[in-house]
Amino acid sequence: MLLLLAWGLRLYHLDAMSLWWDESLSWDRAVNAIPNILANTIQIQNVATRDLHPPLYFLLLHFSVLVAGATEFALRFLSAFANLLTLAMLYPLTRLLSNNKLVALLTVFFAALAPFYVWYAQEARPYALVLLWSVLAVYALLRWLKTNPRTWRAVGSRWFGVFGLSVAATLATHYLSFVLLPFFAATLVIFGDNARLWRARLASPTTALAGLMLLGLAAILITLPRGQQDLASWDQVGATFVPLFIMLRDVWNSFAIGVTGKLDEVALLDLVLVALWLVGVFSTIRVKSRDARAALFLATYLFLPALALHLGSYLRPLYLNSRHLITASPAFYIGLAVGVDALARRLTLHSIQGRQFDVLRLNVKRQTSNVKREMSNVMRETSNVMYALIVLFVALPFLLGTIYSLSNLYFDATYAKDDHKAWSQFLRERLRADDYLLLVAPQAEKIVEYYAPDGLQWESLPHLGQTQDWQQFLDRESVVQAYRKHGRVWFLEIHQPVGDPKYAINNLMRKYGESVDIVYFPAIASRIILQQFVYRGVKQKRGVVIPQPTQIMFGDHLQVRGYDAPRQMEPGTRAAVKLYWRLSQRMPNAISVSLRVTDENGKVWGQWDAPPIGNLYPVSKWRAQTLYLDQHDVVVDPGAPPGKYKIEMNVYYAAGHEPLTARLADGSESAKSIPLADLVVTRPPTPRDPRTLVIDQHANVPFGSAVNFVGFDQESRASPGSAIPLSLYFQVVQNPGHDLTGKVELAAPGWQFWNRAQSSTPFTLELANRQAGDIVQVNVGAPVPGDAAAGLYDLRLTLDGLGPQTTLSWDKALTFGSATVDALTRSTDLPSIAHPLNARLGDQIEFLGYELNAPDPLRPGAQVKLKLYWRALKTMDTSYKVFTHLINSQNQIFGQQDKEPLDGARPTTSWAPGEIFSDTYEFEVAPNAQPGTYQIEIGMYHPADFTRLPTFDANGNPSGDRILFEELRIP
């Protein structure tokens, strides 16, 4: 059970975080040929650099990649599995050392929960593997020493062979594992030949082997490279000398709490765990037999590797992170388990002895042998229960630290690795065919090579391995050629202490172009900045030739003077529409521009909304009477059929999305999208590989011989009463000659038999004029029932007459995704209502009353505020709008507000039976309102066709399609 728990913790979110810098180097070495792996080299640009990490881990990762691929999950799986085997090895190691099964189980328990182990079990680096080899080496060494080897013949035994192979594997996995050599030497002395004569001890093989270990340590320290340039281990870049106390404090905190906690927040927990570990160490000392070997073993296991690393740091700074001493960590968890067990046994014994004395005193004259036996069994069972409870209590500091640290690891973005997935996805969603990426610094080439979108052209700068003058020339040529040959240049900075410390490449980018957009991505080990540059800037010189001149005025001051749009595109591609803007005077409000691709029926087949130019050039900073060039994206959906389309344009305020009225050259005005240019969508010369589609999730599920389901776009979260927007993508295999019908179902997983909430949305897959290889797209909205409980729901796809060809071929529906339905705060409590009034709207909604806030008497221009109270009678499929009108005796409207309930936050589709709502409305009395008597009318209507819901009074009698109340007078 402990191993299952540990396995779950290590696999949970295994691929959630991006690979970070060092992990990309592991990937690069693993996908190389075996001779290159053994050569310990990493190719950066055309320069071969030396990696100090030995090759064993990368060899194993190489074969793992061949079997499982190179996804984040697959790359990290080896570490997770190695750490699981380590936990399995800790049990016999602790049993051998303590001869106590409970202590061994506690050790595995603490190690299974240890955030420090979970973190490095989820990292594609050698640390989990070197820990496994080291634990195996320690176990084999103790097993060999148990045989009391007195002659050199014992060196040929099986366990010494296992020890030798394990030490070799340890040294072949991590370059700093030599810090274990003094500990191995100490163990040989502590548990070695116990002969009374020192001469006999010195002649024993254990003493000689200990001396060899120390000589090996000295040789390694002497041969350590002195210059920083000699170290190609990237996690050593920028290492500085760390004082011993600070190193020990960092290591102890990592072992105890993990690397995802703040030291000042857990300092008290650290001290408590230090005390528990010391209790464990001292409890192993046997005073009568004068045996302190176990205590010495634990102390040397924990501290000698740290001292060896510290000694080496005087020659060359080595310590950068607690991971470099992961091989010493078992001593902490073993000592902690011994300490918890010792305290629990002492407290249990004290408690049981007290209770037993009380029982004996009460029953001393009545005891028989049967009574004594029964009482002994009761005491034994009681002691077991008390021991377990006390163990939990004593271990509580460790458990609290574990919960704190693991919650940070899994759920707090502050502790996440550098988010390379984010910039990769950002680029993938915006990539044009002529885009180019320049990377600073070259040392990050491997992470970019792993995450760069397919089809992106890129190179890294500055050029390495060149003289200074030649490097400057090559860098300048790369920047200039990138500008001249490409419409847009992306500039990715992944800063480390190496790369471009003087910002020479940044200066070149700004010398020949201008940055128009900048995005920062989360990172803890570096800074990730992505900028968009355009050649020679966005301000246009006087007399510039505009390919397609036009005169479109948006609002009062913003004008489009012309454009240059592509004439044809293929499905699933994006291109640039050049828009030439000019302001007649400064505009303070931010705007966004929407370009849509529509067919002859007005159906949208691609849309991209963004501020003009970029976020570094908001319209509020534009100068009046200056011409600006905006290279705005236009997108064609992957499923757009070949044919003729329009590129339409709309401009709206970023806050509130209120459109700016467009005034065309002929004087006509429109608040809707206006046609800008014609576009022909052409079929690709060869069928599109669906794996190259820029979509949320890819798939490959055949439905009969007609189509393959190749992926979908989906919002991951929704609320009751809303609809989940979905885009489904199919590839035609063999056109059946007719359209296909299908449906998307939303339902709780099958095991939630109590949750009956579900919905079904039909759709038609239009295959007219489609050929084999074409991508067909269906856009649907999967409604979430208004009474749906919070939780995870499955999305299932069916095509009539065609079943998905999956392993579950008997199932006619394909579960292709899931969505999380958020909880809604619902209330059925009836509040106090100033003006109760009972009426019904259809059989769906009950009107409970209102509150009115208006001046008396009423006057033109006055504000009227209404608070309406509703109760849902049943779930609804329609999102109704509420109308509130101020009308005179002739039913003329002199004030109104129409809107969805709670400003759209709770549409009627989200209402559950019995739920009560209060909603506020406000309107102004029309200035032309004449003296007289007015009333308020309210009701609801369908926004699609303005059909009102019928109304009924308190007795159930029809009252038309409105509810009237209150008389207001204007004198």
Image: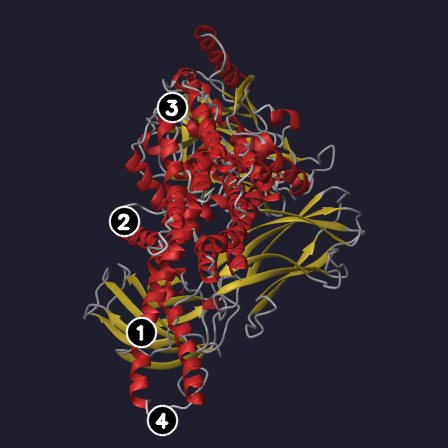
Pinpoint residue 553: horizontal percent, then vertical percent: 42, 35
Q: Amino acid at mark 1?
A: Ser
Q: Name the spot of residue 13 as percent of width and height, x first.
A: 50, 50
Which residue is more in the foreground, 878 or 832?
832
Residue at 58% of width from left, 53% of height from top? 726
Looking at marks 1 and 2 on the same chain, the residue that comes earlier in the sequence is marked by 2
36 shown above or below 591: above
Q: Which residue bears the numbered disc 4?
A: 366
Task: Answer few, some or many: residues within 10 Å of disc 2's Cα (few below 14, many 20 plus, some between 14 and 19).
Answer: some
Q: How far separated are the C-alphas under marks 3 and 4?
A: 77 Å
Q: Residues within 10 Å of mark 3 (few under 14, many from 20)?
A: some
Specify which label sits upstream in the sequence, 4 or 2.
2
Count neighbours of disc 4 (C-alpha within 10 A) and say few if under 14, some if 14 to 19, many if 20 or more: few
**Residue 316: which numbered mark, if any?**
3
Q: Is residue 967 left or right of residue 532?
A: left
- Cα separation, mark 1 vs mark 3, equals 55 Å
Give the label, 3 or 2, closer to the camera.
Answer: 3
- The residue pinned by badge 2 equals 267
- Viewer-nearest of discs 1 and 4: 4
Q: Are marks 1 and 2 in contact (CB under 8 Å)?
A: no
Quadrant of the rendered structure where residue 159 is? top right
**Gap between marks 3 and 2, in whole Å?**
30 Å
| Circle 1 residue | 351
| First of labels 1, 3 by sequence position | 3
Mark 1 or 3, closer to the camera: 1
Task: Indicate whether 785 appears above or below 510.
Answer: below
What amino acid type is highlighted by mark number 4? Arg
Q: Nearer the viewer, residue 645 or 135?
A: 135
- Other residues around mark 1 within 10 Å, as few (<14) / some (14–19) / many (≥20): few
At mark 3, the secondary structure is loop
**Amino acid at pointer 2:** Ala
